[in-house]
Image: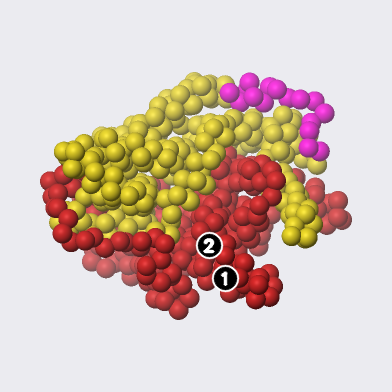
Chain colours: A red, B yellow
Amino acid sequence: MFGRKSGSGKRFQHNTAGYLFISPWLIGFLLLTLWPILQSLYLSFTEYSLLDSPVWVGTDNYSTITTSDRLFVKSLVVTFTFVLFAVPIKLLFSLLVAMLLNKNVKGMSIYRTLIYFPSLIGGSIAVAALWRNMFGLEGYINHILSWFGIQGIGWIANPDTALGTLILLNAWQFGSTMVIFLAGLKQIPKDLYESASVDGAGAFRKFYNITLPMLSPVMFFNLVLGIINAFQMFTSAFVITNGGPANSTYMYVLFLYEKAFRQYQMGYASALAWILLLIIGVFTLINFTVSKYWVHYEAEGGKSR
Amino acid sequence: MMTEKQSSWKNHLLLIPFSLLMIYPVIWWIGASLKSQTELSLPTLWPDKFMWENYTNGWTYSSQYTFAKFFGNTLVMEFWNVLGGVLTAALVGYGFGRLNFRFRNFWFSVLLMTLMLPSQVTIVPQYILYTKLGLTDSYIPLILPHFFGGGAFFIFLVVQFIRGIPRELDEAAQIDGASVYGIFFRIIGPLIKPALYTVGIFTFLWSWDDFFAQLLYLSSVEKFTVGLGLRMFIDQFEVQWGQLLAMSLLSVVPSAIIFFLAQKHFVEGIATTGIKG
């Protein structure tokens, strides 16, 4: 995925110019990323409320979190459930839509616009407000259901369904994932399909033997970033449900936000952030390890060279 | 060949209902923004009586400032964000994409790793830093990262794009006596414009939606962005849905305009920059 062409080795070195050009990023990385990371690691072993100086408490934060904080466990369960459902649903959905949009049909740009548009506005607070209204007890969804004689419930007020509505909202915002799939589909050489047709392969076999393997690097990219993003879900949980009802949508980042910026427990929140980093790191590592078995890269010397 | 026409029909049969399904909530939204509180719970798409007041009252909802102020604030912030994002992506992208310097590969893998770093790990110390510098309740914490490579994804995008440009162009310019700076300004700069459009568009869209940072750093109403303005409706005990939906709808208009003006850059930009590498 992060393919890199090897340099010839004999090329001139431009040390000064090189560092000059990357200096904006490098300065930003050192001051706004690396330094905060280290500080956050330090803070996670302290108690700090912004007013007094940090007090070293050793691993107290971590042991409190893992042994006696029930909200931590709850938010972890909610977040894992969200990731478990939201990521595959979104991936599958975006792949299907991308395949639909990859066809050569008249007026495709209109379809593409209509289908992409919701994702464009997707992450914003505006859509969160819309969603909250639509899935309310008196909301739009229940009226549609009533046409079919189904008695709706307050989807957002009900602890059993609230998380489901957030998962659905997440799937509705499939746009950027879909666009990446679409770009991947367009890169698959047409002659592969043609020769498969000559060999008498049906649509399903073509999908299974050509599309899926050829698309696996893109799938991998979307999967890795999808999981990372899903773990960090915040806006919709904050605006639509605010973690409720009965903490059924109490996402991990919401928990972290409240600890840090409502209760000003900066040390505790930093420990939470490091646990999140660890979880995401483990998932990403597993992803990269497992990828060897299913991600298919074109042989070296493909057209990218 | 024979089935081509038939399958085209099948595609339309699939595409029409599906795209309607996707866009339907947006259409309902437009109708709902014109409804009165009582009509909102009816299943009709359009109201019997059009409540244009939703827009006028919503616009002046906050007694201190109108939404004109919030839109103005957001657009000023966006101007700097886009400028910073595009400039940094171009410069850093060229550095990584073309120049050969010591530890380049090391730094580039660091850059790729920051792509996967959850922002929560840095947000607490960053907040502390900005508080100590007295920069909270200003746009600086929101704008500054864009000038310092905050959009690692965009840098990656530009690097991929630059790698697709034939090196012969640089080499020819080099023979003509151009320096690495000259090559950047005269050759690479103009050629990466399509990628930079993509960077600019996405910087605009994503920072418009970056509710978390705005919520964190802006506290006085005078400095509110549109997103924070919308939140004022939600915080109320009894939510004025009609006004909220009306203002929400207005809040996505800038993104929609950008989208329609720059539509082809969306797919093209991502396709040509080739996520696959």
Point out the tag, 2 or 1, that comes first from the N-terminus: 2
Q: Which residue is mark 2?
A: A188
Q: Under tag 2, what secondary structure?
A: loop
Residue at the image point whose x is 72% and y is 51% from the top: B15
- Is residue B47 inside the magenta stretch? yes
Task: Say which quarter of the image contains residue B75.
Answer: top left
Task: Say which quarter of the image contains residue B169.
Answer: top left
Q: Which residue is mark 1?
A: A210
Q: Is residue B269 visible?
A: yes
Q: Is residue A107 left or right of residue B164?
A: right
Viewport quadrant of the C terminus of chain B:
bottom left
* Looking at the image, residue B159 lies above or below residue A286: above
Mark 2 and 1 residues: CB-CB less than 8 Å, in contact?
yes
Q: Chain of mark 2?
A: A
**Magenta-tinted stretch:** B44-59
Task: Measuring from the top left, give residue B273's x and y in whole percent.
Answer: 42, 50
> A292 or B188, which lies in front?
B188
Q: How many marks?
A: 2
